[in-house]
Image (cartoon, rainbow, N blue to C red):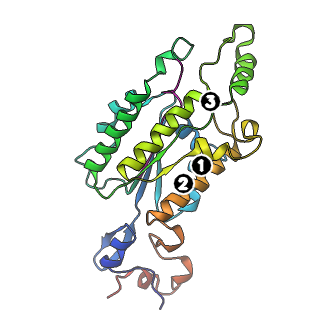
Amino acid sequence: MKQSLVNCSVSVQVGVSELRLTEGMVGLLRPQFVLFGDSITEQSFRPGGWGTALADTYSRKADIVVRGYGGYNTRWALFLLNHLFPLSCATPPAATTIFFGANDAALQGRTSERQHVPVDEYRENLRKIIHHLKECSPSMVVVLITAPPVDEKGREEYAQAVYGEKARKDPERTNEITGIYARQCVELAKEMHIPFVDIWSKMQETKGWQKLFLSDGLHLTAEGNAIVHKELVEVLKDAGFRAENMLYDFPHHSEIDGDHPEKAFCKKS
């Protein structure tokens, strides 16, 4: 009978480990991908979100865990590291995305200035996060994602729709400044030889990106989420997580004998 369960040596190749159920029966422990970031990550499991799409891409092959914190910058994210990624963890994530920058790039002297982090500190904070994750697991795949571009007119329209006459008069973020943070993110990734997604640049390659990809000048539409998902999947493929080559955690239903189901779950000798 065709078997989808494999021995331990093959399991290691696909980034998973054997999970022993009962004597003589095994399954595969799914690798875990953690999405760590601000509100753009927090919202990624909404309908049409890039996290939701990622969970679908890796269905039954990897667990996608969202750790998104709306409004957070890299300075505040540092306080979460030991809680979310304890160094004593026996089963650390196989991959982690770091998606910060939109709040760090908030302008000083404007309504969101308490979120502002100077660009040099932003880069060093990213470096600290990466070092912590690599200390947690040297083999962990860490992916940096830049902040998306900012549509200043879209931000103004959103503020007016929400706050009316009380809306701010000056932009609290600009695309130019956010681009500086995005470039620092990319440069750090290249310096540390880790994969990255330059979503700031990628989105602006499309005419009309402001309304197509951004719902309020900053956060993502369904189309914007799709771009993040597409680019991230390509990076994960290059890192060895090609979904079509990864094994299911347990046998496909077509491999289970109705009269002797236990055979499908027996360890292949």
Residue 3 falls within the magenta-colored stretch: no
Residue 233 location (% of width, % of height)? 55, 58
Q: Looking at the image, which residue is at 72% across and 36% down? A: 210
The residue at which mark 1 appears reads as 228
In this rendering, would 185 be left or right of 164? left
Q: Give the range drawn in magenta.
A: 96-107
Q: What element carries label 2?
A: helix
In terms of sequence position, does the residue under pointer 2 or pointer 3 come before the other?
Answer: 3
Q: Looking at the image, which residue is at 54% across and 72% down? A: 244
Q: Looking at the image, which residue is at 72% across and 27% down? A: 154
Residue 180 location (% of width, % of height)? 52, 32
In this rendering, would 242 be left or right of 228? left
Q: What element carries label 3?
A: helix
In this rendering, the answer to whether 192 lies above or below 113 is: below
In this rendering, the answer to whether 243 lies above or below 158 is: below
Q: How far apart are marks 2 and 3 (CA)?
A: 22 Å
Q: How far apart are marks 1 and 2 (CA)?
A: 6 Å
Q: What element carries label 1?
A: helix
**Of the residues shown, which amino acid type is indicated by label 2?**
Leu
The residue at which mark 3 appears reads as 175
**Of the residues shown, which amino acid type is indicated by label 1?**
Val
